[in-house]
Each structure stands twice: as structure tokens, then as C-alpha cells.
């Protein structure tokens, strides 16, 4: 009997090395590394990898990068995020979140992305693991975790596992060894989840939670009633009756 496929969302702010992590898992370049890519779209790219006889579907996402983009920017994020939810629902739900973060100081965007995916998108019901990148300067990469785990817990960033890695290859023996160790570490992290508790996100409840988390409800004062209902049906793909119910709830809360 074959093992069930696992669905993984890889997220984190721009520049932390998500595409490099995809290439690390693949053992070759399959994702373009674009350090200057910016956006607030929550768009995603889907990859499939066999790891130790198990199939992994990994969605490499673009998170929320900037505050103050206005209603149009957030509606674009909602539209793209809803498409991601629909894709994952068709695959049976989410098994694991991989929160990619750069070794260094935690930023406000780091915490915002953590809350967006873990709390809003997955209802705090999906295991979340941390992938700490750019640790090629560490003599022992795991030492970063030892030094920083207490601070992350104080900031409310929880994890069910972690991988301290570098995706940078080099000609030096130590660089090659760290890269190879990183491949083993992240693959061990992935195969540690059995996929017995998939979480399927209900779009309607998710939508309200998304707006609440982003404190967007007060900003929708110019997008109430029929106008907002039209956006939800035409742009976000909601059923007209569901959109009408959502608008009533938003009008009550905003």
C-alpha cells in the first residue's frame, strides 16, 4: 500500500530563501531565485517531489510584504489566497506549514506572515515547522536554534519541528558538508509527518478570519453592500448566496 501524499505550504517574507529551499529539497535548480521579487499577492507555485517513497506537494507562496497597500491590494491577496485554498481542498487539505525565515532578527513582517498562514489560513490546526536559512556562517548550524528558540517562543512563534540550513553550495569542503547536511535535515523534517490529520479550510469562515487578522474590516467602509458582494462573486469566486451572507456579517462587524 502506497503512502498518502502530503500537502505542504512553504511561506515566509521575500528574501528569506524559499526558492532556494525548494532547490535544496530537489537537489537541483527547479525554482527561480528572485531576491528582488516584491508583492502582496499570496500567489503560489506548486512543486511535487518524491522523498523516501512518499510524494510531497509543496506550494511555494508569496506572502504579505507591505502594510498600507489599501483595499485593492488586499482584495488581490484574498483572490489569490482563495485560489490556493481551493487547490489545497481539491488535494484533500493541508498537512504541514513550513515557515521559512532568515537567521537573524525577527521582523514585524515575519510575525505577520506567521499569523496569516498559521492562524488565518489554517486555523491554528496544522503543524508548523520552521526552516531557518542563510546559516552558512555558523560553525554548527543548529547553534542558531539553541540561541534563539527562547526569544521566538516569547514572540508567540510556535513550532512542531525545525531545520537549520544553508542552500548555498561552495567549493570548500565545509560548505559542501553544510549543504549536504542541510538536505538531510530538511528531508528528515518532511518525512516526519504522516498526513493522518489533514486540515481543509472552509472558505467562508476563513474569509472573515482573514479580514479580522489584517484589521481590514474598518477599511471596507467604501466597499459595503452590493458593491462588495459583486467583488466577492466576480473577483473572488464566491457563490452569490454565500457572498450575500458574508456581506451581511461584514456590514455588522465593520
Image (cartoon, grey):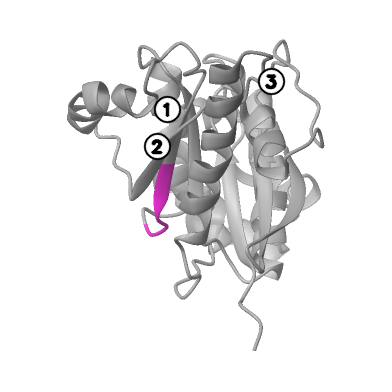
Q: Indicate whether residue 127 is drawn in magenta.
A: yes
Give residue 2's quadrant in the image: bottom right
Checking the image for residue 171, the label placed there is none
* Circle nearer the N terminus (3, 1): 3
Q: Which mark is residue 39?
A: 3
Q: Is residue 178 magenta?
A: no
Q: Does residue 107 sit above or below 201 in this rendering? A: above
Per the image, label 2 sits on a secondary structure element best described as helix
* Callout 2–callout 3 Cβ contact below 8 Å: no
What's the CA distance linking mark 3 and mark 1? 15 Å
157 sits left or right of 196 in the view = left
* Picture mark count: 3
- x, y (%) of residue 10? 58, 41
Give percent across and percent down for residue 27: 72, 40
Q: Quadrant of residue 66?
A: top right
- Give the residue at the far front of this rendering: 173
Residue identifier under label 1: 112
Magenta span of residues: 125-129
Q: Which residue is mark 2?
A: 115
Name the residue rendered at 42%, 35% in the picture. 114
Report the residue at 62% width, 63% height from top.
Answer: 52
Q: Secondary structure at mark 3?
A: loop
In the depicted structure, whether residue 243 falls above or below residue 157: below
> Does the residue at mark 2 contact the one at mark 1 (Cβ under 8 Å)?
yes
Amino acid at each position: 500500500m502506497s503512502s498518502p501524499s502530503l500537502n505542504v505550504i512553504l511561506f515566509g517574507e521575500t528574501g528569506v530563501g524559499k526558492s532556494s529551499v525548494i532547490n535544496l529539497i530537489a537537489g537541483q535548480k527547479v525554482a527561480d531565485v528572485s531576491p528582488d521579487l516584491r508583492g502582496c499577492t499570496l500567489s503560489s507555485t506548486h512543486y511535487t517531489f518524491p522523498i523516501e517513497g512518499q510524494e510531497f506537494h509543496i506550494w511555494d507562496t508569496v506572502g504579505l510584504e507591505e502594510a498600507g497597500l489599501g483595499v485593492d491590494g488586499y482584495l488581490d491577496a484574498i483572490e489569490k489566497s482563495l485560489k490556493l485554498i481551493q487547490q489545497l481542498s481539491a488535494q484533500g487539505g493541508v498537512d504541514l506549514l513550513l515557515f521559512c525565515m532568515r537567521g537573524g532578527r525577527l521582523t514585524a513582517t515575519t510575525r505577520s506572515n506567521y499569523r496569516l498562514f498559521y492562524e488565518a489560513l489554517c486555523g491554528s490546526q496544522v503543524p508548523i515547522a520552521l526552516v531557518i536559512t542563510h546559516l552558512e556562517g555558523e560553525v554548527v548550524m543548529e547553534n542558531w536554534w539553541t540561541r534563539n528558540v527562547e526569544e521566538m517562543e516569547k514572540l508567540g512563534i510556535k513550532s512542531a519541528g525545525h531545520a537549520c540550513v544553508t542552500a548555498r553550495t561552495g567549493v570548500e569542503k565545509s560548505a559542501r558538508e553544510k549543504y549536504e547536511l542541510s538536505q538531510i535535515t530538511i528531508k528528515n523534517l518532511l518525512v516526519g509527518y504522516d498526513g493522518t490529520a489533514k486540515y481543509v479550510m472552509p472558505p467562508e469562515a476563513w474569509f472573515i478570519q482573514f479580514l479580522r487578522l489584517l484589521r481590514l474590516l474598518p477599511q471596507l467602509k467604501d466597499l459595503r453592500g452590493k458593491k462588495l458582494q459583486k467583488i466577492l462573486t466576480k473577483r473572488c469566486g464566491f457563490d452569490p448566496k454565500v457572498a450575500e451572507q458574508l456581506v451581511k456579517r461584514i456590514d455588522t462587524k465593520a
